[in-house]
Image: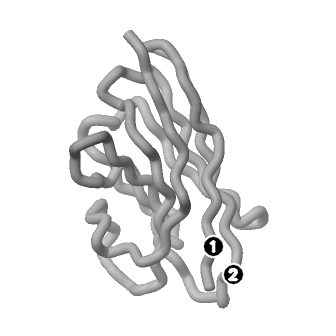
């Protein structure tokens, strides 16, 4: 069973930076697609950035140029570097993973494993 544990959230002012981490365990050796998703109060969960096992990535238009997704395979850890944060980035951020081969997609419905989330709050 895959387990995902996020950390690194917090409260920052607009223009600030945060780095989220997602520690993964329980892999069976299959290749996984992993990504970061967020859900603001009263809104649907949305994809932020995803990365395939071959390193290919996809970003939501709203975060391109500001956020960077990366992974450390040796540590089984996924990262999201968030720069130039805006109040609109305020949300609960979730790490998601899925082993099924797919086109790299930001669609959260394509991911079956989830962490508990970490809150990011950006004030103006």
Task: Identify the element where label 1 is drawn.
Answer: strand
Residue 52 in the image: x percent, y percent? 46, 68
- To which residue does mark 2 refer? 26
Between the C-alphas of marks 1 and 2, the distance is 6 Å
Between 48 and 102, the one nearer to me in the picture: 48
- Residue named by callout 1: 3
Q: Quadrant of the N terminus?
A: bottom right
- Residue lying at the far front in this picture: please name it: 42
Residue 44, position in %: x, y?
Answer: 23, 52
Q: Earlier in the sequence, mark 1 or mark 2?
A: 1
Dots 1, 2 in contact, CB < 8 A:
yes
Asked if residue 83 lies left or right of residue 41, the reply is right
Quadrant for the C terminus, please: top left
* Residue 36 occupies quadrant: bottom left
Question: How many discs mark residues in the rendered view?
Answer: 2
94 to 17, vertically: above or below: below
Secondary structure found at label 2: loop
Residue farthest toward the top in the current orientation of the protein: 124
Residue drawn at (50%, 39%) of the image? 119
- Tell me where residue 28 appears, x and y as whole percent: 66, 90
Crowd rating for badge 2 (residues with CA inside 10 Å; few <14, some 14–19, many 20+): few
| Vertical side of 46 occupied by 12: above or below | above
Residue at 30% over, 60% down: 106
Q: Position of residue 81 (x, y in %)?
A: 55, 37
Which of the colour schemes (rainbow, by chain, secondary structure, one colour) is used? Answer: one colour
Seen at 46% across and 27% down, the residue is: 121
Q: Is residue 2 above or below residue 6?
A: below
- Viewer-proximal residue, 13 or 75? 13
Q: 35 left or right of 70? A: left
Q: Residue furthest right?
A: 74
Check the image and report above or below for 47 versus 111. above
């Amino acid at each position: 069973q895959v387990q995902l544990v996020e950390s690194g959230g917090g409260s920052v002012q607009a223009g600030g930076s945060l780095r989220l981490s997602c520690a993964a365990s329980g892999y069976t050796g299959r290749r996984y697609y992993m990504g970061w998703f967020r859900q603001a109060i009263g809104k649907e969960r949305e994809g932020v950035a995803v990365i395939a096992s071959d390193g290919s990535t996809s970003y939501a238009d709203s975060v391109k140029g500001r956020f960077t997704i990366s992974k450390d395979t040796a540590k089984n850890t996924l990262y999201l570097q968030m720069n130039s944060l805006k109040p609109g980035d305020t949300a609960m951020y979730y790490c998601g993973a899925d082993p099924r081969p797919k086109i790299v997609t930001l669609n959260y419905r394509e991911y079956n494993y989830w962490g508990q989330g970490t809150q990011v709050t950006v004030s103006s």
